[in-house]
Image (cartoon, helix red, strand yellow):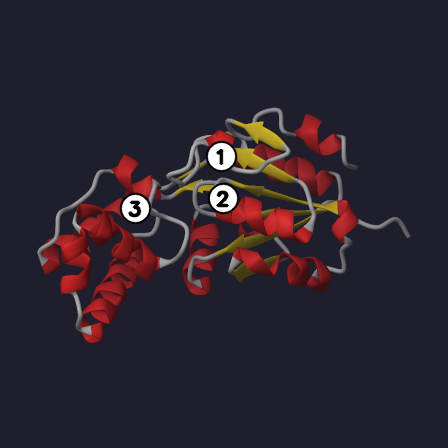
Amino acid sequence: MKQKFTILFDLDGTLVDTAPDLMRAHNHVMKKFGYPTKSTEEIRNLVGKGAGAMIGRSIWGQAKKEFHSVEDKSVKDQMSKDFLNFYGKNIIKESTLINGVKEFLKWCKEQNISMAVCTNKTEHLAVDLLKKIGIYDYFEYCKPDPRHITNIVEILGGDLKKSLMIGDSETDANAAKAAEIPIILLEDGYTEKNKDEIYHNHLIKDFIGIEKIISEYL
């Protein structure tokens, strides 16, 4: 039996542009606790390492002293809790699929390609988002934390030599590089780094025409 090819996807900024809804949740928390709000574009640079990290990086970015002023762990925990609660209730108000995603996922299914999502997003939120935006059934697996690439490929019964990653940040790229699999990078990702600073094998704007790249590996 021929070994199936495996594609691993990041979620935020790769499959779905979630920044508008993350911005709304972020600003809800910041207003409540007396910190400055941010624009959607600013939020794109903060996403990728979980709610707590995003809130911390947001405050740190405004003023280092402000970050240190939140010394009470219970306050930090409450900020994260409030963020997740608000976001969970408003997860798909303005979030949209990246251009070409659904067509590409359909093509992958036709090619008998195994697909899984690797994300730092809280698992129940990731599953809820995928279901509500209509692409959950394309994936065989959804696991938080993109560092566990090799585990996911193993769970899917795949082969690292027949796998690749599609992501939008240095976190995805570094994980793929460590696993020694190719990485396709979306050029306008949720990261502060320039695309030229991030390791990648291929660079794309969206999923239109990506089948040509994948076909090279099949």
Q: Is residue 201 above or below residue 156?
A: above
Q: CA distance from mark 2 to mark 1?
A: 8 Å
Is 170 placed left or right of 59 in the picture?
right
Q: Which comes before the other along the chain, label 2 or label 1?
A: 2
Q: Which residue is at a point 70% across and 64% down the rendered structure image?
A: 155
Q: Which residue is at a point 18% across and 49% down the rendered structure image?
A: 27
Are the residues flagged by discs 2 and 3 in contact, CB closer than 8 Å? no
Amino acid at pointer 2: Glu
Q: Position of residue 89 (x, y in %)?
A: 29, 58
Q: CA distance from mark 1 to mark 3?
A: 27 Å
Amino acid at pointer 3: Asp
> Residue 105 occupies which quadrant of the picture?
top right
Which labelled disc corresponds to residue 197? 1
Is 8 placed left or right of 198 in the picture?
right
List the residue tagged with mark 2: 170
List the residue tagged with mark 3: 21
